[in-house]
Structures are given as structure tokens and as C-alpha cells.
């Protein structure tokens, strides 16, 4: 009986230690930054690149170059777009010359918010805070905590 009690105490102690250590933030932990801390960098990018932006409540800075005239996508839509994505130093990290088709529900949060502001045929320039892009994780050539610029033309909208 003592062995069972001792084993139970050890098990509970180790379990508690693991649970507590999972909640700690060490130097290797992901540390997202606030939208407010990136705003001046985002505004400077817009100013330097002649983007006459509107600020969305989410922190996205955007300019609707052309609103379009077709159907408006929802997060559940299948969309086709031609786009360019850049870092704040104007380095292009991704671009499509021909339309690319995917579900709007499967992309970064900033796109889910900004793309529905357009109608089919519309074009938007948007600067996303990192928290609505790849946050503190980064992705490929995109460093962690990087605000991103996208120039997107919505060429197609389909309901799922």
C-alpha cells in the first residue's frame, strides 16, 4: 500500500511540474507583439509607398484602389486572386502573376478581414499587423513579428 501511495505522489508531482512548465514563457517561447507597437512602422510604410490608408478596427491599414462590382466574398467563399506580398523593407516574399484559387477560410486572419471589403474585380492594398499575419512564428522568408504588405486583386468569388 505504501508503494502505491508513494508512486501516486511521485506521479502527481511530476504531472504538476509538467503542467506548470508548459505555461512558462522562456526565451524560446513565441512572443507576439501588439498592434500598437507596430503602428508607426506600418504608417511609415504607407507614407513611403503613397498608400492613402483607412484604419480598420483590427489595426489593418488599407486602401481600396478599386471596389469591384461583382459579388462580395465571405469567409466561407472560394476566392481567386492575383497578389504580391512584401515585407516592410519592400522585399517581395510571394507573388502570383496568374490567379490563384483557395478558400478564404484557410488564409491568415488579415485576409479574412480585408478581402471581404472588396467585390469581385476589386483591388486592395493592405498593411497587416503581424498578429493578423504570421505572428511570432513567422513563415519561410517571413521573420517572426513582421507586419506585411499585400496588393491583392480579387478576380473571382464562389460560394462553397
Image: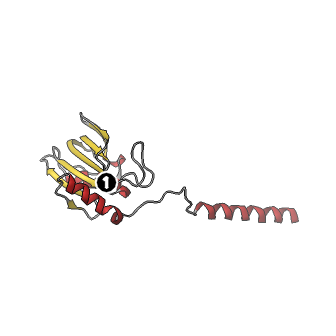
Where is residue 115? Give x, y as percent.
Answer: 24, 51
Q: Indicate the quadrant containing the N terminus: top left, top right, bottom left or bottom right.
A: bottom right
Which residue is denoted by mark 1 in the rendering?
A: 110
Where is residue 106? Give x, y as percent.
Answer: 36, 46
From the viewer's perspective, tell me whether residue 94 is left or right of residue 19.
Answer: left
Residue at the limit of the structure toward the right, as seen here: 2
Quarter of the view holding residue 156: top left
Q: Looking at the image, which residue is at 24% across and 52% down? A: 126
Q: Nearer the viewer, residue 105 or 55?
A: 55
Where is residue 25? Give x, y as percent.
Answer: 55, 62
Number of other residues with Cα within 10 Å of mark 1, as a class: few under 14, some 14 to 19, many 20 or more: many
The mark tally for this picture is: 1
Q: Nearer the viewer, residue 101 or 54?
A: 54
Asked if residue 79 shows in the view, the reply is no
Q: Classify 37 as above or below 138.
A: below
Quarter of the view holding residue 82: top left
Q: Indicate the quadrant containing the C terminus: top left, top right, bottom left or bottom right.
A: top left
Q: Secondary structure at mark 1?
A: helix
Q: Nearer the viewer, residue 110 or 137?
A: 137
Q: Looking at the image, which residue is at 26% across and 51% down? A: 74
Q: Looking at the image, which residue is at 55% across and 58% down? A: 27
From the viewer's perspective, tell me whether residue 100 is left or right of residue 64.
Answer: right
Quarter of the view holding residue 85: top left
Q: Classify 96 as above or below 48.
A: above
Q: Looking at the image, which residue is at 20% across and 43% down? A: 153
Where is residue 78? Give x, y as percent.
Answer: 28, 43
Amino acid at each position: 500500500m505504501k508503494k502505491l501511495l508513494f508512486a501516486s505522489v511521485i506521479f502527481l508531482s511530476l504531472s504538476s511540474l509538467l503542467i506548470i512548465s508548459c505555461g512558462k514563457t522562456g526565451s524560446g517561447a513565441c512572443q507576439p507583439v501588439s498592434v500598437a507597437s507596430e503602428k508607426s512602422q506600418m504608417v511609415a510604410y504607407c507614407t513611403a509607398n503613397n498608400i492613402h490608408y483607412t484604419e480598420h478596427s483590427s489595426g489593418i491599414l488599407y486602401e481600396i484602389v478599386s471596389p469591384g462590382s461583382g459579388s462580395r466574398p465571405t469567409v466561407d467563399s472560394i476566392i481567386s486572386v492575383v497578389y504580391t506580398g512584401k515585407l516592410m523593407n519592400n522585399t517581395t516574399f510571394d507573388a502570383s502573376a496568374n490567379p490563384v484559387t483557395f478558400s478564404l477560410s484557410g488564409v491568415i486572419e488579415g485576409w479574412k478581414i480585408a478581402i471581404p471589403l472588396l467585390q469581385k474585380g476589386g483591388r486592395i492594398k493592405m498593411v497587416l499587423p503581424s498578429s493578423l499575419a504570421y505572428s511570432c512564428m513567422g513563415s519561410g522568408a517571413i521573420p517572426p513579428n513582421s507586419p506585411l504588405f499585400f496588393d491583392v486583386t480579387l478576380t473571382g468569388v464562389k460560394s462553397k
